[in-house]
Image (cartoon, rainbow, N blue to C red):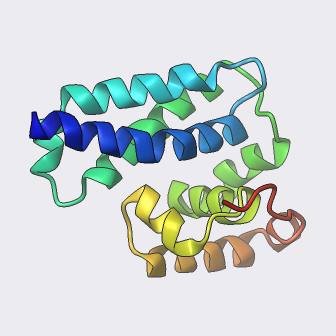
Amino acid sequence: MIADLGFAAFAERNSPRYTLYAAARLSAGVRTSAVVEATLTSARARWEWLMCQPCPAAEVWEELRQQVERQSEHSAPQNPVLAVLYQRLPNAVCADSWVLCRLLGFPVAEAAELMGTEPSVVEAALAAARRTLPQLVDAEAPLRHL
């Protein structure tokens, strides 16, 4: 019963934010709710195992990112800038940090919580993105601030 409540709270808190991320990365024709649902279904099936991990949020974020990657292989990105970011930045953390903080307008601390990492990691990832692709990352303004 307690595990069910814990998962329900986790899903309720993160589902809208996961949906925003998936919608930003995927083409308009992709059902982002299906991607988020698949991620949360996987998390629910592994919930006890996840609760034994050092950072359950990081594990679920990685699952979400993989679900989005699988879907993006079959369709063009909604925003072509994102395709360049994910190809040319040093790693997915840099690109995910940029999407969450610069495109969607999440505060650094909230993006870090969502990805299951520390704010300093997100700040470093954003700095790496600015150094690597200044012409792209400085051109985008936040679409939404939560």
User: With 31 as the anchor, is 11 left or right in this view?
Assistant: left
- Residue at the location (56% across, 79% down)? 123
**Residue placed most toward the observer, 131 or 30:** 30
- Residue at the location (64% across, 42% down)? 20
**Residue placed most toward the observer, 67 or 101:** 101
**Residue 42, image x, y percentages:** 30, 27
**Residue 21, image x, y percentages:** 61, 44
- Residue at the location (30% across, 47% down)? 59
The C terminus appears in which quarter of the rendering?
A: bottom right
User: With 35 as the anchor, is 45 left or right in this view?
Assistant: left
**Residue 51, image x, y percentages:** 14, 48
As displayed, is residue 84 above or below residue 128? above
User: With 82 as the anchor, is 58 left or right in this view?
Assistant: left
As displayed, is residue 104 above or below residue 26? below
Res 113 → quadrant: bottom left
User: With 41 as the anchor, is 104 left or right in this view?
Assistant: right
**Residue placed most toward the observer, 43 or 16:** 16
Residue 131 visible somewhere in the drawing? yes
Residue 125 visible somewhere in the drawing? no
As displayed, is residue 73 above or below residue 109? above
As displayed, is residue 94 above or below residue 25? below
**Residue 19, image x, y percentages:** 59, 37
State how many labels appear: 0
**Residue placed most toward the observer, 129 or 50:** 50
The N terminus appears in which quarter of the rendering?
A: top left
